[in-house]
Amino acid sequence: MRGRVTLGHQVYVAPFAELDGSKNAILVGNESDVQDSVVVDATNGAITIGDQAILAHGATVKSSAKIRTEIGTTGKCPGNDPRPEVCPSFVGFNAEVDGAIIQKDAMVGHLARVADGVTIPSGRKVRPGMNVTKEDEVTIKTLAVTDDDRKFMHGVVEVNREFAEKYALEAADNVRGINNNPSTPPFNPVRHLPNLCGAETRDPRFRNRIIGSVKMEDCLSQLDKVMGSEISVRADEGEPFVVGRIAEISDHATFHALEHKELNLGRDGQYGPHSIVHGGDVPNDGVITRTGNGVTIGAYAVVFGSILGDGVIIGDKSLVQGSKLPANRKIAPRQVWVNDKFEGNVEW
């Protein structure tokens, strides 16, 4: 964090997030979270992030000259919310908000973008990959927020509020490098150290964050060769993670899972810069997001709650969510696949 950055109560700022308030102020409200490798850049104007705002892994929030950038500060919450003045808003994986307003109870889908001067109103969610550049596109590029969406957002707020409390209790050298997860009784009560090539390992000096019940085939000396910088492998929510021998992980890649979900990644995987592999419910298959051997996931690509066969290639800036891809399947760059269906292209 740099410059004028103000955080509210129970705010979780994850590894390698960057909040740049060196030119203008950034205000983050209570119970919000700024997840791994998120960028909040107030170079061109102040940014206000309200209560219970979720900035998911890899999201970018930036300001435009003379245009307000606000998330979760205006609009209204659903009538049945227990606290009608407070409800979540959401910016998805590798999405971008540039000088826009995202109201309470509104969402920006994964790999979507909202441009300067646009408001996403309460109760609407931008479809994944869409680029909303003007107000008259809002209706055609958004859908209604559902009860399942609201349940998901409330769950994310609860988990990250727990992280804000429990990580704050950790010693300084426990929140760096290769280390234990904190004890979070609602979903992950047991502390674990990562296991690297058969041995429990703790190294707070390592440049990347590897946390919790992570079993990796590579030893630390090999990880030092194949991993870039500012990479998160966080089994502090969902667990366990099992990771085969790695070919390459580039800078700012993130590996995480929802509570009670797992990751199982095959051998010789290649993961591009800012790529995200996230565990979630796999339709008709349970709780383990997994990949085969020799899988390639491109720059800024997102894999969420899916199964990839051997040799699958995911092109740069593509989304694969809730899908099962057979061996050697190739997804072209900038495509959106949800529940095994092609939903369109990433527009920006």
Image (cartoon, rainbow, N blue to C red):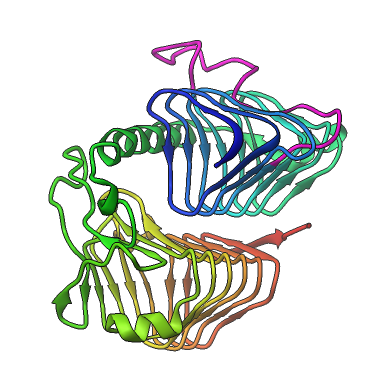
Q: Residue at point 77% right, 27% down?
A: 68
**What count of labels does the image hold?**
0
Asked whether 65 falls inside the magenta stretch, the response is yes
In this rendering, is residue 347 above or below 46?
below
In this rendering, is residue 110 above or below 8?
below
Residue 115: give x, y in percent of width and height: 80, 41
Q: Residue at point 78% right, 57% down?
A: 347
Q: Is residue 278 left or right of residue 3?
A: left
On-image quarter of the N terminus = top right
On-image quarter of the C terminus = bottom right
Answer with the quarter of the image where residue 224 lies: bottom left
Residue 117: give x, y in percent of width and height: 83, 31
Q: Is residue 314 left or right of residue 46?
A: left
Residue 290: give x, y in percent of width and height: 36, 72
In this rendering, is residue 292 above or below 300?
below
Residue 244 seen by the camera = no
Answer with the quarter of the image where residue 309 lies: bottom left
Q: Main secondary structure of the magenta part?
A: loop
Residue 201 seen by the camera = yes
In this rendering, is residue 193 above or below 312?
above
Q: Residue at point 31% right, 39% down?
A: 163
Q: Residue at point 40% right, 87% down?
A: 293
Residue 172: give x, y in percent of width and height: 29, 47
Asked whether 20 falls inside the magenta stretch, the response is no
Q: Is residue 337 left or right of residue 153?
A: right
Specify start and end residues of the magenta stretch as a single range: 62-87
